[in-house]
Image (cartoon, rainbow, N blue to C red):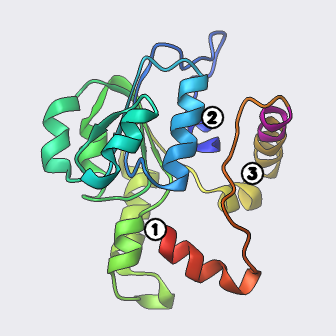
Amino acid sequence: YQALHRCKPRGPRETLEGSNILVTGGNSPVGKAVIELAQRAGASKIFATAAKKHHQALHDLGVCPLPLDAIMWLPLVRGKMDVVIDGICQDGYTSPHAALNYRGHLVVTGMTLIMNGAEQGHCGTPWDAMVQRFKSGFLLSRTTRYCPYESSQLRPAEWKHDMEYLMELLARSKINPVVSKRVSLDAVPYVQQQLE
């Protein structure tokens, strides 16, 4: 939920109302949470990439489903998005960045495709993941990298504010996360792998 909150414009008119938003991997738990929050924030149009088998479920959520392959979806949204949330890093964030309009903002929440498909590199992290992390943090304009753990360690006051905001939304029933199953701590890596 916080990925979308973090990219909100700062200033007297903090709103996402009327925005066009693209979520890569829209069928994932993070993607669904972003979609829910974007709808509650009054986004005008929400697009989400996913495998064809998930398109009907996304459509039922009021989202415009797009193919998972950036070559197929980019021509449809190039230069039109106010906000893009990318958690998969299909092509080094190139296509999500190209989807932004001139005031748009890219929020990087992960790199699932790299992490799932790469061999471990130096210190366990795939080399491509380190390159993309650097690129999203320092080379791409209008881009924010959002990692809850990193935020909690490097910007504790901001992280605390984010958590208080989330708890307020939850208490007021403004967000309704779906909990389908509880798992033991030992099972978390396996379940996370299955979700991705």
**Relative to residue 94, is residue 8 drawn left or right?**
right
Which quadrant: the N terminus? top right
The mark lying in front, picked from 1 and 2, is 1
Which residue is at the front of the view, 60 or 48?
60
Residue 10 visible in the displayed image: yes
Relative to 60, is 174 on the left or the right? right
Secondary structure state at the residue bearing disc 3? loop
Give the mark toward the camera: 3 or 2.
2
In the picture of the structure, the residue carrying the numbered disc 2 is 5
**Magenta stretch bounds:** 166-171
Residue 23 in view of the camera: no
Q: Earlier in the sequence, mark 1 or mark 3?
A: 3
Q: Is residue 123 above or below residue 81?
A: below
Residue at 74% of width from left, 51% of height from top? 155
Would you place residue 133 above or below residue 50 in this image?
below
Frontmost residue, 41 versus 172: 172
In the rendered image, which quarter is residue 104 located in? Answer: top left
Give the amino acid at mark 2.
His
What residue does disc 3 label?
A: 155
How many residues crowd mark 2 within 10 Å: few (<14), some (14–19), many (20+)?
some
Would you name the residue on which mark 1 appears?
196
Report the amino acid beneath label 3: Arg
Estimate the spatial distance between the alpha carbons at disc 3 and disc 2, rounded to whole Å: 15 Å
Q: Are marks 3 and 2 in contact (CB under 8 Å)?
A: no
Where is residue 35 shown, x and y percent of the image?
51, 36
Distance of label 1 from label 2 (alpha carbons) = 23 Å
Is residue 124 part of the magenta span, yes or no?
no
The residue shown at (34%, 58%) is: 89
For label 1, the crowd category at 10 Å Cα-Cα, with few meaning under 14, some 14 to 19 and many 20 or more, is few
